[in-house]
Image (cartoon, rainbow, N blue to C red):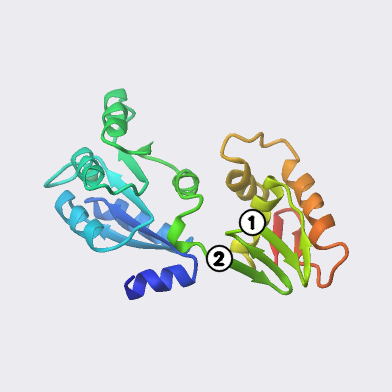
Amino acid sequence: MNYIAQLAASQNLMRVLLVEDEERIAGFIRKGLTEELYMVDVARDGGEALDFAASAGYDLYILDVRLPVRDGFAVCRALRQRGDKTPVLMLTARDAVADRVQGLDAGADDYLVKPFAFQELLARLRALARRPPHITDQILVVANLTLDTQRHQAQRGQQLIELSAREYRLLEFLMRHRGRVLTRTQIAEQVWGLDFDAQSNVVDVYIRYLRRKIDDDFEPQVIQTVRGVGYKLEA
Ligand code: CA
């Protein structure tokens, strides 16, 4: 692993290769993703994209369809032929069915039609990159709460804590984003997927389950409610 990849791994950052020849759009996406703590490289054409992809380990590719040298479809096909299984999000210029079909046939995992809302791009990226293998810390620690992500085991001090699969996933998500305020929507999207019912109180219910198991009988309390917004996990 090179230095940047190690740094990204140590900080749980996602590495994104953005392939976009339009300066304005590339700049806008890069700025937004950087603020969301992604590490972003930009390639300006299809040839550069394949060179970058070969030399660095990315967690995600964002591929514009209309590109100089090789278009996005050709780049995607070439990546897949190399055996590169990194998730690909295609950016298509218009909502043409033919483009979408061609993109998915070329091996893309998802597509987004320009112009798009930045929040939607973020949601797609999160969905594509739920658990990138090489940025996974094995043991997450907050105060005396530890989570072994290989064994799926939670522990408070010396005491092992039984969690259901969903509780585990919720706790892992909170611990990976420790110290950050997470909205109910962010939590629901990550832990339940994009198709959850926004009106449901499932997040609050599961936070209550989790508190009962990891906070009620222990000090310090690590799950904090951020009134009107969501939750934060912090010592
Ligand atoms: Ca373009």
Relative vertical location of residue 96 with respect to residue 141 in this rendering, above or below: above
Q: Residue furthest top?
A: 97
- Which residue is located at x 14 percent, y 44 percent? 70
Question: In the image, which disc is placed on residue 152?
Answer: 1
Using residue 177 as the reference point, say whether residue 72 is left or right of it. left
The image shows residue 57 at horizontal and vertical percentages of: 32, 61
- Total marks in image: 2
Residue type for callout 2: Gln
Label 2 neighbourhood size at 10 Å, few (<14), some (14-19), many (20+)? few
Given residues 226 and 84, the one toward you in this image is 84
**Residue 21 versus residue 219: which sits nearer the camera?**
219
Mark 1 element type: loop
Q: Amino acid at mark 1?
A: His
Q: Earlier in the sequence, mark 1 or mark 2?
A: 2
Mark 1 residue CB less than 8 A from any atom of ligand 1: no
Q: In the displayed structure, would residue 4 be above or below residue 57? A: below
Give the label on residue 171, or none.
none
- Depth check: 185 or 178 in front? 178
Q: Which residue is mark 2?
A: 138
